[in-house]
Amino acid sequence: PLVSGAEVVLAAAKDGRGVGAFNVIQLEHATALIAGAEQVGAPVILQISENAVKYHGALKPIAVATLAAAAAAEVPVVVHLDHAMDRDLVTEAVGLGFTSVMFDASKLDYADNVAATTEVTAFCHDHGVFVEAEIGEVGGKDGVHAPGARTRPDEALAFAEATGVDALAVAVGSSHAMTERTAELDFELIGRLRSAVPVPLVLHGSSGVADADLTRAVEAGMTKVNIATHLNNVFTGKVREILADQPNLVDTRKYLGPARTAVAAEVARLLTLLKAV
Ligand code: G3H
Ligand code: ZN
């Protein structure tokens, strides 16, 4: 079923479990992510980013499909708006029934980030929607590999208290859109952030994080772990393999179906690494 972000993320943080948050671009992503979660019996977060909305030209079609898939799932599923910078998009997502939102004003300076995030958080809370925000820009979203950013624990605490957010994305060494799993996470900083900040912590750009470090990150104090590029790599790798083998294939189901199956298996494996069960 579709469940609230609070239900899944707060329970995981309390128990020291991780929660896998994976991005949906096409319907096949949504069904693959749910199938993988069902294989291991773990809750899962399906997230649609503002960039994916730009790709589709609208939020509603992919959102309605994802929400319907979530409602039919055998495991708890959160549908989350990822990296929203546009407040109108947040309003639309809340209206459509999203149960979690990330408002990303991390490109603004600290004071403006606090002001904008506080307003959006109040609106979401009025509608019972869980809110994630970011402090200390993780970087890499513009195709720039920027692993140097770090979130300061004192600033993270002040930000969480000032804005009332429910979860906080922090910069601890990962970077968005890495295709090699070579990120060097600052586990000591994760531990300090965990002690300083009362709300669950979110790791972005986790595609660059190696298997063992995903587990270590959860053990050190991260809760929501966002992975997108790595699963696109799995998906596209399978499509590439099938089309190379069968150059005359035209039925899209013949390559999207196996790609979906491959993503589901990888999601099941990642959720186990994240101690999500
Ligand atoms: O918000 C989405 C994630 O941070 C995914 O990043 O594509 O580098 O795994 P990634
Ligand atoms: Zn991200």
Image: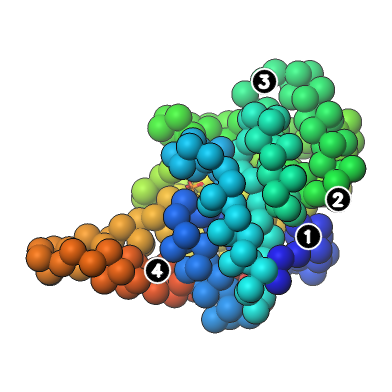
What is the crowding at mark 4: few (fewer than 14 residues within 10 Å), some, or many (at least 20)?
Answer: many
- Name the one closer to the observer, 72 or 42: 72
User: Earlier along the polypeptide chain: callout 2 or callout 1?
Assistant: 1
**Element on which disc 2 rests:** loop
User: Earlier along the polypeptide chain: callout 4 or callout 3?
Assistant: 3
User: Earlier along the polypeptide chain: callout 2 or callout 4?
Assistant: 2
- Name the one closer to the observer, 158 or 105: 105
At x 10%, y 64%, the residue is 247
At x 71%, y 65%, the residue is 2
Amino acid carrying label 2: it is Gly
Disc 2, disc 1: CB below 8 Å? yes
Disc 1, disc 3: CB below 8 Å? no
User: Earlier along the polypeptide chain: callout 1 or callout 4?
Assistant: 1
Quote the CA–CA distance across marks 2 and 4: 32 Å
Q: Is residue 96 left or right of residue 182?
A: right
State the residue position of label 4.
260
Q: Nearer the viewer, mark 2 or mark 3?
A: 2
Residue 27 place in picture, x, y as percent: 47, 60
* Among the 4 quarters of the image, the one containing residue 78: bottom right
Disc 4, disc 3: CB below 8 Å? no
State the residue position of label 1.
4
Quote the CA–CA distance across marks 2 and 1: 8 Å
Q: Is residue 18 left or right of residue 265?
A: right
**Element on which disc 1 rests:** loop
Residue 189's mark? none
Amino acid carrying label 1: it is Ser
Residue 96 place in picture, x, y as percent: 70, 49
Amino acid carrying label 3: it is Leu
Residue 103 place in picture, x, y as percent: 70, 36
State the residue position of label 2.
128
